[in-house]
Image (cartoon, grey):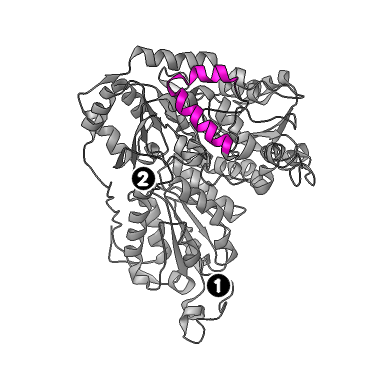
Amino acid sequence: MNYKMKIKIGDVILDYLIKKKVKHVFLITGGAIGFLIDSFYGNKKIKYICALHEQSAAMMADSYSRLGPNFAATMSTSGPGATNLITGIYCSWFDSVPNIHITGQVNLNESRSSSKYTKNCRQIGFQETDIVALSKNFTKKSIKITNHNKIYEVLNVLDFQSHNKRPGPVLLDIPMNIQKETIQKRKIKLSKYDSVIKKNYTNLIFNSLKAAKKPCILLGAGIRNSGLSEKDIINLSKVIKIPYLLTWSGFDLMDFNHSFNYNTIGVYGHRSSNFIVQNCDLLITIGCRLDTRTTGSRVNTFARDAKIISVDIDRYELNKNRGLQIKHKILQDAGIFIKNILASKNTYKANLNWFNYCNLLKKNFPFDRESGFRGKFVEIYRFIRDLSDSLDNNSIIIPDDGGHLTWTMQAFKIKKGQRLFSAFGNSPMGYSLPASIGAAFARPKSKVICIDGDGSIQINLQDLHLLKKFNLNVKIILINNNGYGIIRQFQSLYLGKRYEASKKGISNPNFKSISRAFGIDYYRIDTNSKSSIILKTVNKKGPCFYEVIIDPKQTISPKLEFGRPIEDLSPLLERDIFDKYMHTMKRKVKKANRTFQESN
């Protein structure tokens, strides 16, 4: 290869992305990015996908990175093109997803910073927006390049920042005059990343396990972010045989039927799972930031009788000091931590009494019994269970936000090999459809299930065109409750059933007409018996649109009401039954609940 030749800045960037194994860039063109996009001409190693909104492009890249080469890219023009990326970048920022967002910018001599006389002006160049200043709070690094000779060094810095320690998005802003420059070609050298601390904590873990009577492990997103998969968790469960609990971000790390999988905990968790974490005396959390959706708003009541050992790559997450008492804070990459345990010759198995108690909870509080709502049309929890039964092990499931996200996370029975994720930290309306498109390009041989709602799908409805254009194997499950169900439930509990802007003022288009306008096969499922339509058509190649009609009064159950500890989900259990399953904590629970009642 001739490294003495001169190439365009755009060619350097594409060479970098190819080196990062990126095959698709999600973009929308514009005047300020045109010179850079021109470098795609004649390049057979990388393609661009023309998104229909920059927000969608960022969400496509987010999903692509989660499933593909663990890196992705967008390109957009300056001004509104750049600012439209923000919601999608936030999805990657909160969920620690590495990617790069490349924005065009006005010529340097047209920028506010070009002269002392213009620095206080609002704008000089057309669509000039300081996206670097805007994005510093939600990227790991944002750089505006002003010297084209520094492009290799800048890319190296951004690559390092995107992957080093806790991963996340980065942004590169390139003025138009820089895009037109050429530079001597050099070899792309990728950064070596620092995994923080390589100290071995195996002795601490096994000594703590031996001293415990009721231990459990909580799995979070940091495990996949470290490069591990469900195979590593299966191996871990062969070494440490105790109950495993899941956060939503760790949902697809264990097969639903794995004997040590005791399901998800938290505000919308399984009742049995919440009882387990609240009764344990040792809790080992791996790659889990213990946010309030996991602990509940009364953070000091979470696992209150347990010694907590928390493994996290981010020191700020370990040191939040919001009322949670962590005995041992292990600042380490989750992958290194687990690999050290797997490499040791130690093993541990919890005592039979503890397993018997956990299994009794599973038996006495099966989720099927919890979700007892019977209304008109389709019973949503039953539908989600049937859907999960119908999907193969290679499927990718991406729910959006709100009610349909929660119903999915509560009722879906994940299988080995499946992936299920959403933008859990940001959880914006409109994520699932573009994310499903990104997933389809990252994993073209997989079936992608986009679970969306009648409200959220309308945020990025234009993306239906891309499904048909590329004949992507995406199945849209549109759960229609004619409004914002999760907000209505909130208004029922706290706002006197005044359904402002969730029922009142809300209307839907004709989704059958819309799907057919985009050339996508449409199916309406408005009774339980019609759910069989999914079984007959889900393996059909290409996109399909299923509108699932559910009762507008359908609620999320169980769920935590504000101010209660997570073991006390609504609908509330009879107190004698509740006390029976919280027997090891009875005095502390009663005291905590008494304090809560007195303060309210």
Residue identifier under label 2: 318
In screen coordinates, is 254 left or right of 523?
left
Residue 595 percent across, percent down from the top left: 53, 35
Query: Looking at the image, which residue sits at the far front?
Result: 598
Q: Which mark is residue 128?
A: 1
Front of the two marks 1 and 2? 2
In screen coordinates, is 49 left or right of 67?
right
Compared to residue 533, the image places residue 477 above or below, namely below
Residue 345 percent across, percent down from the top left: 20, 24
Viewer-side residue, 175 vs 112: 112
What secondary structure predominates along the stretch shown in magenta? helix
Tell me which amino acid carries mark 2. Leu
Tell me which amino acid carries mark 1. Glu
Q: For residue 200, what is the image quadrant? A: top left
Query: In this rendering, does residue 210 appear at all?
Result: yes
**How far apart are labels 1 and 2 at the CA level?**
39 Å
Viewer-side residue, 211 vs 392: 211
Residue 32 percent across, percent down from the top left: 54, 68
Magenta stretch, residue numbers: 573-598
Mark 1 burial class by Cα count in 10 Å: few <14, some 14-19, many 20+:
many
In screen coordinates, is 98 left or right of 445?
left
Q: How many marks?
A: 2
Secondary element at image label 2 = helix
Viewer-side residue, 294 vs 514: 294
Q: Quadrant of the N terminus?
A: bottom left
Q: For residue 155, what is the image quadrant? A: bottom left
